[in-house]
Image: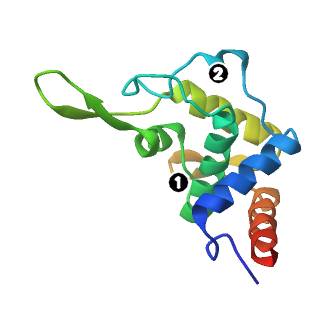
Amino acid sequence: MIRGYDVNQIELVNRLAEKLESEKLVTPLEWSKFVKTGSSKDRVPSQNNWWYLRAASIMRRMYVNKKPIGVNRLRTIYGDKKKNRYSGHHFSPAGGAIIRHILQQLEQSGLIKKVKLQAHFGRTLTPKGISLTDSTAMEMMKK
């Protein structure tokens, strides 16, 4: 059986983004056209479908990680080095509102769920989210 690990990860994210867009599982908010993805960025994203790509990337991260993951960890993953004039580059996390809204939309569509692991809260993929990722990988291998 082909799983999400067995295929090219960049293609998997692109195909997942297409599915999320075509099935209307995630929708970009009105303000998403005007915001940067983090304070370390200079401009807004140049791609029109960046909201779907970020949602698909978050789903892939959850698929690979298997543990509950929260907004703070995802901010660290998607963060970047911020350009400082005199003191060099320093790490700056990504914007939390974008990640939070994407997680809420994925949760409303039934692809992820909130879980508690000991004293920590986070989100993981539901069986529906896992099957969406695996079926996308199967389609990629068939073509």
Name the residue type under label 1.
Gln
Residue sitting farthest toward the bottom: 1
Residue that mark 2 sits on? 32
Residue 98, position as x, y percentages in the image: 59, 28
66 versus 44 height, above or below: below
138 versus 117 height, above or below: below
22 versus 86 height, above or below: below
Q: Is 69 positioned to the left or the right of 84 in the image?
A: right
**Residue drawn at point x = 16 percent, y = 21 percent:** 85
Mark 1 or mark 2, whichever is nearer to me: 2
**Residue drawn at point x = 66 percent, y = 15 percent:** 31
Crowdedness near tag 2: few (<14), some (14–19) or many (≥20) residues, C-alpha within 10 Å: some
The mark found on residue 53 in the picture is none
Q: Is 10 positioned to the left or the right of 138 in the image?
A: left
Crowdedness near tag 1: few (<14), some (14–19) or many (≥20) residues, C-alpha within 10 Å: few
Q: Is residue 125 visible?
A: no
Name the residue type under label 2.
Ser
Q: Say which label, 1 or 2, has the lower sequence index.
A: 2
Q: Distance between the residues labelled 1 and 2?
A: 35 Å
Q: Is 63 positioned to the left or the right of 132 in the image?
A: left
Residue 60, position as x, y percentages in the image: 62, 57
Nearer the observer, 19 or 128: 19
The mark found on residue 118 in the picture is 1
Classify the position of the C terminus by image quarter.
bottom right
**Residue drawn at point x = 58 percent, y = 34 percent:** 99
| Disc 1 secondary structure class | loop
Q: How many marks?
A: 2
Residue 79, position as x, y percentages in the image: 40, 38
Q: Is residue 56 visible?
A: yes
Nearer the observer, 113 or 97: 97
Q: Indicate the quadrant where residue 1 lies.
A: bottom right
